[in-house]
Image (cartoon, rainbow, N blue to C red):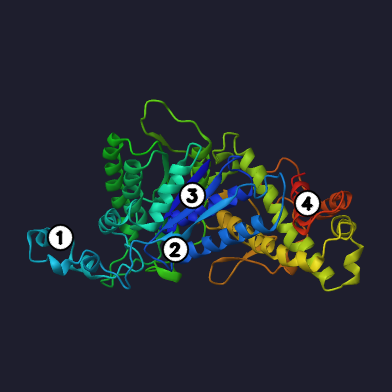
Amino acid sequence: MGYYVIGIGGTGAKCIEALVHLAAAGLMPDSGELQVLFVDPDTANGSRARVEETIAHYVACKDQLNLGHTPFLQTKIKLFDPILWTPFDMTNPSLEQFFQYENFRNSSVGKLFDVLYSKTEKENSLEVGFRGHPSIGSAVLAKSVDMNKDETWIEFSKRIKNDDGDPKVFLAGSIFGGTGASGFPTIAQILRDELDVKLGGALILPYFKFIDDGVDGQLKARSDEFLMNTQTALKHYHLLDKTRVFDKVYLFGDESRTDVKNALGGSEQKNAPHFIELYAALAAIDFFGGDFGDDGSTQYFMTAREATNHLKWTDLPDGNNGDTVRSRIGQLARFAFTYLSVYYPALKNIANRSADAFRATWYVNFFERTGTQIDEAIRRLDFVEEYSKDFLLWLANIQGNCSELEKIELINYGPYAERKPDGNLDLKSTENFSTNVSHLIQSQTEAESNVLNKLWERMCDSRRKGRGDAQQNLGTFLRALYENCGK
């Protein structure tokens, strides 16, 4: 069975970022591949570029290491090639170029075109997206998404039709901007018309605002229009409900909106992760693993926190009062922290022939006795380092990237991350990671004292039986570290 997810625009990509991290923590259904596609006219979008890099690190870990049966990285991620689909095959595209406006400008169709779109809307470049104008995006995408002609969509259709399970497609995008607001309903309708699938989606309502909207005559999204755009869009979805396009729709937003820079797009549009995207990822997991009604009607889901402007683990909808998400994310957080601060540096010291490092019993058990070549191991373990950094920084932002009006009690990122002068969170150098990681996860039932020492003892008591190839031996070591981080 395949789980297909389409991230539309920058917000949609960030929802997939959260889903990838939850998959790494073992929260996806046990069977099936997660198949990922991005839709965005802004090919240089900074937020999506970060997500693509995270996925690359995840896939490299999965491919390079034989982890065996473990929740850690249990889900295989299969990408489309290319992973990004854009409706444009021209440089510096505009709406009038895309529709070849000059060929019909003097006709009745041209006059209708002039009524529907202003001069600015027709002439401005769409290279960095639809700039908060879903009317433009809907027209472009409706003309471009073709299951019978476009290679990406032909491949998408082929995978669905060859899926021997019950394929499920999940879309994620914002309702208040340009690309997500236009792509979410348009692509959904085409998929419903062309394919036999279960169709769901996370529809993201406003959860951030721009620091400076600016008034410079350029076509751009404006946060003072977000609520009006949302109201209009929700009316559209109410009418769309009669056509039963979606099986399940999940709606999320945040009244206390976070401040972000109003970048026109491209690499400058690199917004930090936000907890709303964590909710969207949990929605995708619920959709992939859930049941569906028999009457064919669309199911709508919303959630609320126990207290306004206060987020705790118990507010996360995992069917277990937040305990499952807290436990899995906590285990992965401890693994990533201890791997980066203790075990990976120790292995690098060994590779550099540092005599002291050879005294570690866990190294003897997992590497020397199994005949694993440490030089080869380090090359493979580099991917784990990169993914661990991705995860910890994402998790720090889930805690720290919020409005001043909100109180979030999920994790303590102080042991490994810090806020820079520009206001952004970043990882400390691993040498400066704290040795005191008690309460890395907030709201724990028991205090953790001497966590690193206790973990070291457990790792020294663990061992690999027999010999195997490098993938197996490294996988056994990492699996043991991950499992011991859950105790």
Q: Dot 4 corresponds to which residue?
A: 476
Q: Position of residue 21 (x, y in %)?
A: 59, 52
Q: Nearer the viewer, mark 4 or mark 1?
A: 4
Residue 72, label in figure: none
Dot placed on the residue nearer the N-terminal end, 2 or 3: 2
In the image, 427 versus 461, the foreground residue is: 461
In the rendering, which numbered label is found on residue 260? Answer: 2
Disc 1 marks which amino acid?
Phe
- Indicate which disc, 4 or 1, sits on the residue closer to the N terminus: 1
Residue 39: where, in percent of width, then height? 40, 57
Mark 3 or mark 1, earlier in chain? 1
The label nearer to you, 2 versus 3, is 3
Foreground residue among 365 and 207: 365
Q: Amino acid at mark 3?
A: Ile
Q: Tag 3: Cα neighbours inside 10 Å, few (<14), some, or many (≥20)? A: many
- 450 relative position to 138: left or right: right
**Could you tell which of marks 4 and 3 lies nearer the N-terminus?**
3
Residue farthest to the top, as pictured: 294
Real-space Cα distance between discs 4 and 1? 63 Å
Pointer 1: what residue? 113
Image-quadrant location for residue 240: top left
Gap in angstroms between the C-alphas marked 4 and 3: 35 Å
Callout 2: SS: strand
| Residue bearing the label numbered 3 | 276
Please state the horizontal and vertical placement of residue 428, each as a whole percent of the image.
Answer: 67, 67
Dot 4 amino acid type = Thr
Q: Please identify, in this view, whether the residue under mark 2 or under mark 4 is nearer the observer.
A: 4
Q: Secondary structure at mark 4?
A: helix
Q: Is residue 136 left or right of residue 485?
A: left
